[in-house]
Amino acid sequence: MISVSDENAVAFHFANTYARLPERFYARINPTPVSAPRLVMLNVPLAVSLGLDPAALAGSDGVQILSGSCVASGSEPLALAYAGHQFGHFVPQLGDGRANLLGEVLARDGNRYDIQLKGSGPTPFSRRGDGRAALGPVLREYIVSEAMAALGVPTTRALAAVTTGERVFRETVMPGAVLTRVAASHLRVGTVQYFAARGDVDALRTLVDFAITRHYPEAALAKQPCRTLLDGVIGRQARLIAQWLLLGFIHGVMNTDNTSLSGETIDFGPCAFMEAYDPDMVFSSIDHQGRYAYSNQPHAAHWNLTRLAESLLPLLVLEAGSDEAGLASAQEALAAFAPQFDAARLAGLRHKLGLATEREGDEALAEDLLARMSANHADFTLTFRRLCEAAAEPGKDAEVRMLFADSAAYDAWAASWRKRLHEETASPLDRAATMRRVNPAFIPRNHIVQAALDAAVEREDFKPFETLLDVISRPYDDRPELAQYTIPARPEQCVTQTFCGT
Ligand code: AMP
Ligand code: MG
């Protein structure tokens, strides 16, 4: 039996709005209690920023709540309804099959956040799934989402990880775990698709109003609120995907149910940061056609946003006054994706190369470097990080060129780069410092993540994971004592494939 926590033990001060939406938006369902909950990770700074007391969360009542064994005072647990295109195939009903939205909290920054348990037991949306999560994937989401946050990328966050004392059955038997996820909201493109597929225009309108209030308040005052919302989502997704590319991040499962309306990175499954630059890189074991390969991500995002525009069409038509005008409005909104993505990517590439001014040939210069990196298997993160030093001191070129299979390939490019840098006014030292703020030294390298997950799962040793959390928490600082974490995997350490683990 599930119990309700006493009033004062862990004060979330939930202020729920999703639970006020019509019943067809969700299923009211409590998490399923677990046999032996144990807190293995608590994000103390995040707890504080949410106005939560970390000591109370780490206490026995807190752990009961974080494991789903007890419902916090004020919580109204829900499993959200949504649909989605999975690898291009439409599934009219997906929904939270292993998650419970506990409620919403108002954080110190004034924003509202969802607190969700993931892996917290079956729901009416579970289909054949067991509603559970395994420790490995929970820790992977924890580390990668926290790395993304530290890198400055919009993302859901990880508040806590709890082991359940129960086993889950995947390819092998794994320890069960529950992740507490924090998100600006859990609204997805798939949420809109869910109601569009049912022809439920009233629900679409309610959902659009909700998304506007929550994420795009300026749209409420616009002449065409739904179109303004669509513009907003498209703009945020364009900038988000540009940020992913600029950091070498591959999401792995860019289905429409994993595309958030808030513009946050969400649902970390078989995601990874690439090491040697390769635009065709795919890690996910289930992505056989490379649909979500590194350089396909902008196309995938545009495809997903096209599904969003289609789903919003009934409202766009009403706003625009006719079928033709509604369709034109959707097309106009979608046409803005590519220029916004291109502009964000080019601005980011300029920053990565230390260019504060804009010149005609900058894009070609950046593409030339990327092509040479690809042909020479140069490590993406390390190349750009070492360019920061080289920008200050040409003597440091040696450190960059050694990353290229044929070092002459770097030398030829570096000559044009230096010529271009002569047109810049910043001092070399200032330029290097600015570059260090966009070219991270530390990313969660796959082999290091894997080793940390293995230690936790196989030996209940969480020390490597904690160390890695510290490493990724300040990705742009030089920390010579952590130099080993900046180095790419040796061939025998290389992780070439990642798994959903769901
Ligand atoms: P994901 O691949 O995590 O984006 O999940 C896709 C869909 O499968 C969502 O509807 C999930 O809720 C559902 N799902 C994933 N894993 C499980 C599980 N173990 N039990 C029940 N539903 C699941
Ligand atoms: Mg998902």
Image (cartoon, grey):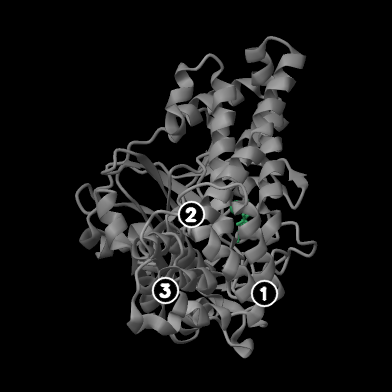
Q: Is mark 3 on a helix, strand or loop?
A: loop
Location of residue 468 in the rendering, given as x and y in whole percent from the top left corner? 40, 76
The image quadrant that residue 367 belongs to is bottom right
Please report the residue visible at 64 percent of the width from the left and 41 percent of the height from the top: 190
Residue receiving disc 2: 423
Does the beta carbon at disc 1 come under 8 Å from ligand 1? Answer: no
Among the two numbered marks 2 and 3 on one chain, the one whose residue lies closer to the N terminus: 3
Q: Where is residue 358 in the image (x, y as percent from the top left)?
A: 52, 46
Quick one: 161 or 144, which is closer to the camera?
144
Q: Quadrant of residue 463?
A: bottom left
Whether residues under marks 2 and 1 lie with C-beta atoms below 8 angstroms apart, the answer is no
What's the residue at 50%, 85% (across, down)? 458
Q: In the image, what residue type sits under mark 2?
A: Glu
In the depicted view, which residue is nearer to us: 118 or 30? Answer: 118
Rounded to the nearest whole Å, what is the CA distance between mark 2 and mark 3?
17 Å
Question: Which quadrant of the rendered structure holds the C terminus?
Answer: bottom right
Image quadrant in which the N terminus is located: bottom left
Say what amino acid the circle numbered 3 marks: Glu
State the residue at coordinates (62%, 45%). Answer: 342
The dot on residue 424 is none
Is the residue marked 2 within 8 Å of ligand 2, measured from its CB? no
Q: Distance between the residues labelled 3 and 1?
A: 38 Å
| Residue 260 visible in the shown view | no
List the residue tagged with mark 3: 393
